[in-house]
Amino acid sequence: MDQELLQVYLALKKAERSSLTQRVKIQNIKYNDAPTRYYFSKIAARKHQCLIGKIVDRHGIEKEGMQGVNQAFIEYYKWLLGQQVQIDSSQMGALEGPRTHETSWDELCRDVDDREIKLALFFIASNKSPGQDGFSAQFFKTSWDTIRHEFCNVVKGFFKTWDMSKQANTTLLALNPKKPVVSTFMDYWTIA
């Protein structure tokens, strides 16, 4: 008798879960990208899920809160990116390879022209992620006739001065967890 009741209970719980799952799927399809309360609650839930509440820094000290976690990440990446890498003689072979002949140097050092700049831009896949300015390669390709002179001047200016604006030379790092529970920097994949 108890076993039969347990089976009935489990079957009803399974049916209830299935019903709830179907309702969520229907809600998701119905309101997926519409600016509704449901949509914004999903954004808030995702934001909360991506929040890093605490992290163990490289010295083994646990840092909590927005400011503590931010400082720990900044310190870690400054340390990581500022290291000098020692290369032993066994690794030197990887640095050797075909070299450019002296006769090619003039060709490599000449000024770039508008045609080369356009070819390089149009070689970039249109559906790539947008840059820091929020514009994708598709935007630049579509508006090429309008922006061509300014675009080419910026590229040529870089090759003349070797100076790039800070905004154009910044990188955003996205931290993707390698496993469900993360606690250290090594638990994240870093994507630039």
Image (cartoon, helix red, strand yellow):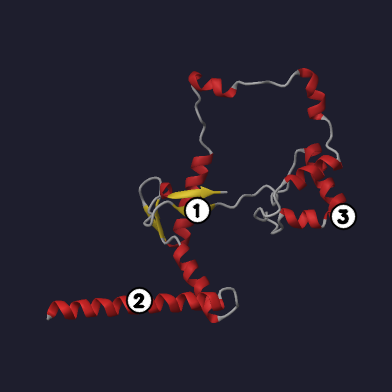
Q: Which amino acid, mark 3?
A: Asp
Image point (49%, 67%), residue name? 46
Residue 105 x %, y %: 78, 23
Q: Of the residues shown, which amino acid type is indicated by label 1?
A: Leu
Mark found first going from the N terminus, 1 or 2: 2
Q: CA distance from mark 1 to mark 2?
A: 33 Å
Res 100 → quadrant: top right
Instruction: Return the residue found at the far left.
Output: 1
| Nearest-to-viewer mark from 1 and 2 | 2
Q: Residues within 10 Å of mark 2 (few under 14, many from 20)?
A: few
Nearest to the eye among marks 3 and 1: give it.
Answer: 3
The secondary structure type at the circle numbered 2 is helix
Q: Position of residue 11 (x, y in %)?
A: 27, 77
- Residue 103 point in image, percent of width and height: 80, 19
- Which numbered disc flags the more N-terminal residue, 3 or 1? 3
User: Residue shown at 61%/50% (left/top)?
Assistant: 171
Taking the image as shown, residue 4 lies to the left or right of residue 17, namely left
Question: Which residue is disc 2 drawn over?
Answer: 17
The reply to whether discs 1 and 2 touch (Cβ–Cβ < 8 Å) is: no
Q: Amino acid at mark 2?
A: Arg
Which residue carries the number 1 mark? 175
Q: Are marks 3 and 2 in contact (CB under 8 Å)?
A: no
Q: Is residue 59 above or below residue 91?
A: below
Real-space CA distance between mark 3 and mark 1, rounded to the nearest whole angstrom = 37 Å
- As helix, strand or loop, the secondary structure at mark 3 comes to helix
Q: Secondary structure at mark 1?
A: strand
Determine the CA span between mark 3 and mark 2. Answer: 56 Å
Which dot marks residue 70?
Answer: none
Give the mark nearest the N terminus, 3 or 2.
2
For residue 163, what is the image quadrant? top right
Between 157 and 145, the residue placed more toward the observer is 145
Identify the residue under disc 3: 145
